Amino acid sequence: MKSWQLFCAMTALLITLSESAFAAKCKGSEAAKNQRIAEAFLASNSKKPGVITTASGLQYQVLREGNGGDTPSRRSEIVAHYDLTNLDGKKLDSSRDRGVPYQTRADQVIEGWSEALQAMTVGERRLVYVPAELGYGCKGIRGIIGPNELLVFDMELVHIVKPGD
């Protein structure tokens, strides 16, 4: 066996082992419980007036319309305000509380945020329900976000940064 073939075989083995360990962690009781709670919530929430469900499973409700102008692309630099809570309403993070909007590229955040941003116009404010598969998955963030926990963002697109801004 040549060295590159050995390298490829070892890499494939490591990926398989990593995926197995990841899948085993996702099967924990807390992850399963959070998944059931999220699925039940999303099914019920989808029937509420004004709640829109996208093809990915992301849900949102428009709280305030934007200016109707441009929407950011996946690679756009954006400025946004947000409050992050869990389903119990516990606040986990907030740019509003810090008094400073969050600036980042739309492709450098969790998938649910990125998807929501790309459909918003400046000034728009949404309540966004992010399923775990579009958020932090079964890993969560230790001590902050549980495994398979659904996240609720009150997010507002403040500005799309243009070159030279």
Image (cartoon, helix red, strand yellow):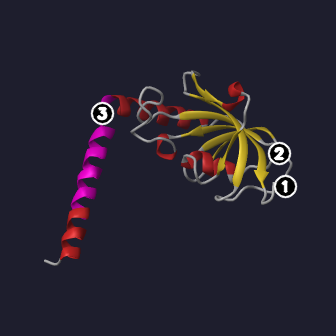
| Residue span colored magenta | 12-29
Residue 141 lies in quadrant = top left
* Residue depicted at x 43% and y 42%: 137
Q: Is residue 60 left or right of residue 145?
A: right
Amino acid at pointer 3: Gly
Q: Are marks 2 and 1 in contact (CB under 8 Å)?
A: yes
Disc with the residue nearer the chain's start (3 vs 1): 3
Q: Tell me which label, 3 or 2, sits earlier in the chain.
A: 3
**Quadrant containing the C terminus in the rendered view:** bottom right
Magenta highlight on residue 160:
no
Amino acid carrying mark 1 in the image: Gly
Amino acid type shown at disc 2: Gly
Give the residue furthest to the bottom: 2
Q: Is residue 43 left or right of residue 74?
A: left
At which x and y percent is residue 22? 31, 45
* SS class, disc 2: loop
Residue 21: in magenta span: yes
Q: Badge 2: how crowded within 10 Å, few (<14), some, or many (20+)?
A: some
Say which residue label 2 marks: 66
Q: How far apart, in angstroms, are the residues tagged by discs 3 and 1?
A: 45 Å
Q: Which part of the image, by quadrant, shows the N terminus?
A: bottom left
**Residue 69 appears at what percent x and percent y?**
84, 55
Q: Residue at x 68, y 54 (%)?
A: 118
Q: Which residue is mark 3?
A: 28
**Residue 69: image tag:** 1
As drawn, 32 above or below 20: above
* Vertical order, 122 against 10 (above or below): above
Residue 70 relative to residue 83: left or right: right
Towards the viewer: 104 or 124: 104
